[in-house]
Image: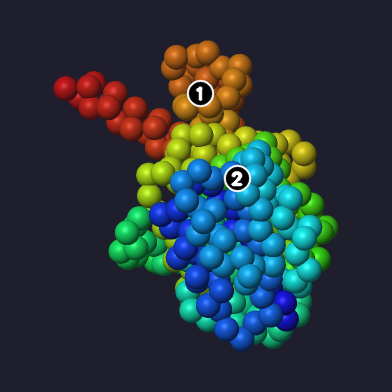
Amino acid sequence: MKIGIVTPCFNSAATIEATIQSVLAQEGVDLEYIVMDGGSTDGTVDIIKKYESRLSWWVSEPDGGQVRALNNAFPRLTGEVLGFLNADDVLLPGALKTIADAFTARPEADIIHGGVEWIDFEGHPLGSHLGRIESLEDILDIYHVWWGNRQWAQPEVFFRRALKERVGLFNERYDLTFDYDFWIRCFREGARIARLDTPLVKFRKHAGQKTADAKRTNDQLREILLRNLDKGPGIGWWRALQLRAQLSYDLYQTGAFDIGLRHPHITAALLLHPYWLLCKDVRSRISCSLQRRAALLCF
């Protein structure tokens, strides 16, 4: 089974060699590997050139960012199974053989994922993570699943090329969360998921990575959820109503989007949006308020 991997990079000289080595060291698989450099000026290109004879293709030129680079690279891949690995992450030994064997054993699976080992910039261990998302309802629930320690870490996820061709390009609108948007679209296409209880990649956590911009990342996640609920959730109406209530209340609190609310007090806002009472946070807030008032009366 041929596996195609893409690494997008830009000024990644400090980490990209470890990334490239981790991919090229994979044994027991038919590998095609593309590196997309955005026109680095820090020595990244010199490192890529050291390995160019073993790469399926590479380029260094301004590319409009990570998402566009991936969109330009994936049509060049011919492998049955695809994935992408950022220039600060590394595959664990045997990861691709594990994935190839898993797809062979599960011909019905469209997406297979494992786990990640968190590391810091210097490569020191920070812990581990194993996602668990099984349905469209799961992945739309950013509150209890995606932000509830069940999310996928992108480099642990591999997918069939046939699924990618059905789903289409990554959405360049979401530079920080295009993978989340893509997974939702995969579920809408009926993607079937399998999980491996084993780590596949070391995921580097550091202040310089894009997703360190937590506020903008979370704003994009909320926007993706809102768009999906507006287009027809594809999940049970009650769960969709709960998610819409939580999202609306969340936006009221954070001001992430203009939803026409200018009420300084929760009581006034609830008159317009009584379905917020479906949110546990709102009920807890009201309960605490009532308890404080009762305590003052007793005093």
Q: Position of residue 87 (x, y in %)?
A: 51, 56
- How packed mark 2 is, by other alpha carbons closer than 10 Å (few <14, some 14-19, many 20 or more), is many
Quadrant where the N terminus sits is: bottom right
| Between 193 and 161, the one nearer to me in the picture | 161
* Element marked by disc 1: loop
Q: Earlier in the sequence, mark 2 or mark 1?
A: 2
Q: Which mark is residue 38?
A: 2
Left or right, residue 136 beside residue 273: right
User: Does residue 269 lie above or below 167 as drawn?
Assistant: above
Q: Amino acid at mark 2?
A: Gly
Q: Is residue 111 left or right of residue 19?
A: right
Residue at left offset 74%, top offset 68%: 160
Q: Residues within 10 Å of mark 1 (few under 14, many from 20)?
A: few
For label 1, the residue is: 255
Amino acid type, label 1: Gly
Q: Which dot, 2 or 1, sits closer to the camera?
A: 2
User: Residue lying furthest left in this view?
Assistant: 299
Question: Which of the labelled discs sits on residue 116, or is there none?
Answer: none
- Residue at (50% x, 23% y) in the render: 255
Q: Is residue 239 visible?
A: no
Residue 205 x/y as whole percent: 39, 53
